[in-house]
Amino acid sequence: MDVHPSDLIDAAAEVLKPHVNGDRLFGDVGAALVSGSGSVFRGVCIDTGSGTGFCAEHSAIAAMVTAGEYRIRSITAVWRDDVGRLFVLPPCGRCREFIRQMDPANIDTKVVLGRDRIRPLSELLPEHEWPEPVDSYSSDTPGPAAPA
């Protein structure tokens, strides 16, 4: 099942239910993704003062993994301001890497950045491949000297 970017944005917006608890804020960012099977999974962010919170994309991905899936076809995250305007948020660097690590094919995940704006994860995470060595090493070659 393919989901139109606008429908994915709307699915993410449906889970927005901001809740303040002291200096903590829960649910002010929502995410939705389409898995490899075509299922839609959603999640919200949890911000904590101790740094143990997580992004909405992580929450949606956790729901997907709980269902036994790892491939992400498309994903988006949204936030609504105090006057009710809806914004699509690009994934942070941690989320980009998290998406990639779920499945090697996720480098081709379509990241929805607006109702008419989509980019593959590979464009948002350009240096994603393991680097080539800058020099060669063999067991016959002495290794680097130990630090003094």
Image (tube, grey):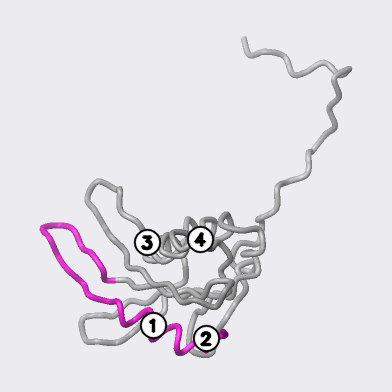
- Between the C-alphas of marks 2 and 1, the distance is 10 Å
Say which of 96 and 136 sits in front: 96
Specify the quadrant of the image occupied by residue 38.
Answer: bottom right
Between discs 3 and 1, the one toward the N terminus: 1
- Between the C-alphas of marks 3 and 1, the distance is 16 Å
Closer to viewer: mark 3 or mark 2: 2
Between discs 2 and 4, the one toward the N terminus: 2
Q: Secondary structure at mark 1?
A: helix
Residue labelled with disc 4: 68
Between discs 2 and 1, the one toward the N terminus: 2
Amino acid beneath label 2: Val
Residue labelled with disc 3: 55
Residue labelled with disc 1: 11
Q: Secondary structure at mark 4?
A: loop
* Residue 3 higher or lower than 37, as above or below: below
Closer to viewer: mark 3 or mark 1: 1
Specify the quadrant of the image occupied by residue 101.
Answer: bottom right
Q: Position of residue 114 (x, y in %)?
A: 48, 84
**Does the stretch in magenta take in 63?**
no
Q: Secondary structure at mark 3?
A: loop
Magenta-highlighted residues: 1-28
